[in-house]
Amino acid sequence: MFKKLVILTLALAMLVMLGASIQAQDDMETYVLGVALPFTGSFGTFGQDFERGIDLAVAQMNAELESAGSSIRFETASADTEQTPEGAARALQTIVQTTGAQVVVGPLTTAEVLGAKQFADENGVVIVAMASSGPAASIPGDNIFRVIYPPDTFSSKAFATIALERGHQNMVLLHVDDAFGNGMKEQFITNYQANGGGEVAAFAYAPQSTELSTEAAAVSAALAGFGDTAGFFCVCFPGAAEAFVQVAQIDPVLTSVQWLGNEAMTSDEMLEDPGHAQTLANADFVTVSQSAEVTPLTPIFNADFVAMFDKDPGIFTNYAFDAANIAMLTMLAAGNDGAAVKSMLPFISNHYIGTAVQAFLDENGDQAIASYGIRRVAEDGSGFEVIGTYDGNSDTITYK
Amino acid sequence: MPPALLTTSLVNTIQIGSLYALMALGITLTFSVMKLPNFAHADYVSAGAYAALIVSLSGVLNPVVIMTAAFIVGALAALISHLFVFKPLEGRDVSLYTLILSSFAVGLIIRYILFLMADYFNLFDLRIAIPLRILFREGSLILSNLFAWVVPTSILLVIALTLLLNRTPLGREMRALANNSTLARVIGIPVERVKNHAWLLVGGLAGVAGALWGMQTAVNPLMGWAAVLSVFAAAILGGLSSFTGTILGAYVVAFSEHTVMLFLNFNFGVDLAYKPAIPFIIIIAVLLTRPQGFTQFFQRGGDLQR
């Protein structure tokens, strides 16, 4: 009898505890933060690393909310954009329809952002993109916020100015055939020719291309046609950039002219190949990319990332971390409501200093602070060295 | 089109066409002997490329060793996919559509294993570390050491495969299996053993192609998949049953992608970004006008006939 009483008492106690737990859970409010990134495709490595950055931001935010006694918690819902505009649209739709998320961090490229835009605008979902920079997505009043990386309208001016300073009377341009590459091409040609530049021969390559010998042959022939005073500008994605340099390094014309290129050409992988490094060094390769400043939060982020994932963060992973923080801080202020987040996000962004740069948004919801570094390959090909800065807001280049 | 551009494009045609031929021969062999249009073939190429990359990163820069490693890994990937997926499915007498879908699934599994490995060890977009240098230069004709590896290796492997099919008991058994698998079984050919050897050969060729492709471009888990359309176009041009036709098809596809594309760009301003459309156009054109491809031109003993 006593045994039965003990068991009954224990069972009742467990029921009470379970009820209390359920009650406690009922009091908690969970905000879903959508994550739409390319987990597959040639940018899969970026997508996976960016997701880790977002997971770190969410874990830290939840820990702070818990210690502050808040009833709000964040959780993420991810979907693969497959690195295509259609995939990005599907990813956004999947996240929103399965979880009711009102805010989505990502996608990565401008083409993906534009692919997801219609669904976001029509359904009041806010997109917080961390690395998209194509001018085509600079649209006032829409639901897209590009909070970290400034649009290429700035860097294209810097590239055009540098080309003219180097005395390139004509230019040959190879670019990826998507919103980013086409936007950079148009902006570059406009700026270059408006300031006295001559003819620009532009060649596009398909985004999925991995073998670029045809493109290299075409670029080489165009450069040969222009003569000694032409320069080359490569607007390529990672992977294609390596493939292009691979075939270009034995081309007598391509190895005799000066090169400009976007920051995909400055990956660590590029310089790991001595032939590639030497090719870029011989071409006096110069790139213009956003200045990633070190803030007090930068080393903390790096250490926390290593502690959580046992690996170093990849390039731009901190941008994803910052974008997620801006999104979550806005949701804490505005609630889990797309329209309110859209209204509040510029205010929060403009008061946010993260791991790399101060966020400050323009009328299009894009990063307005355009501070770039100008870098070139060291003569021995061992690394990239900063040779100057470009202030996009005043359109001023300053060399060291 | 300037002569220099024409020369460069023809060199590219020969180099890339040789690589397509190596990859496409495996597809033709799989289709003829196993009756399977194997879409996982692309991922044997990637697996071989990663084996080659890892060996080269370990400091071994001898191309023969690198290609041997790629052959072994490609062959094992193909054999494992046969033993654990295709063979059990064949035993259940499933439809061709099921087999095709399962080949997509096998390809996805291999691809994502490579993705996981590449992510963990940071092995994206690296190049197999054999330095590229010019071996021969006369005017606009430039031949690199890569050309000197790719073209002879492809030709030697094609000759070896042809000799194997024509002059060895295993080759005769494979051809018998390709012609009539039921009859082959009835007359006592060890069908499973022959199939195992065929899969090893298919995967090995794909692996070597991956190693050479990884010297031409950058290695990533999608590199085989990115080439699969061109390779299937070559195999379809060859009628999926003729080695000679497949090799010719590979060079036709490469010629279209390089020389014809540059001609169209230079003379008519057609954007180079349309290059990936060329294999689609070839596949559709062949299927509409000549589904048998080049088969009728090459009905000789050396080829696998359906």
Image (cartoon, grey):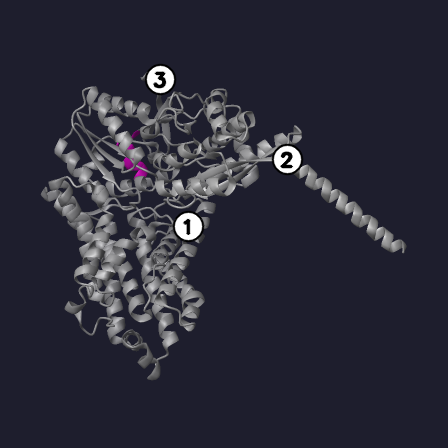
On the image, the x and y values in percent for residue B23 come to 29, 59
| Type of amino acid under label 1 | Ser
- The residue at which mark 1 appears reads as B58
- The residue at which mark 2 appears reads as A28
Q: In which quadrant of the rendered image does the N terminus of chain B lie?
A: top left
Which stretch is magenta? Answer: A276-286
Element type at mark 3: loop
On the image, the x and y values in percent for residue B113 come to 45, 53
- The residue at which mark 3 appears reads as A393
On the image, the x and y values in percent for residue A364 come to 37, 23
Residue visible at 35% across and 17% down in the picture: A393
Q: Is residue A285 magenta?
A: yes
Q: Residues within 10 Å of mark 2 (few under 14, many from 20)?
A: few
B64 vs A239, nearest the viewer: A239
Residue visible at 37% across and 48% down in the picture: B220
Q: Find residue B124 and report its image quarter.
A: top left
Left or right: residue A139 compared with residue A61: left
| Residue A250 seen in render | no
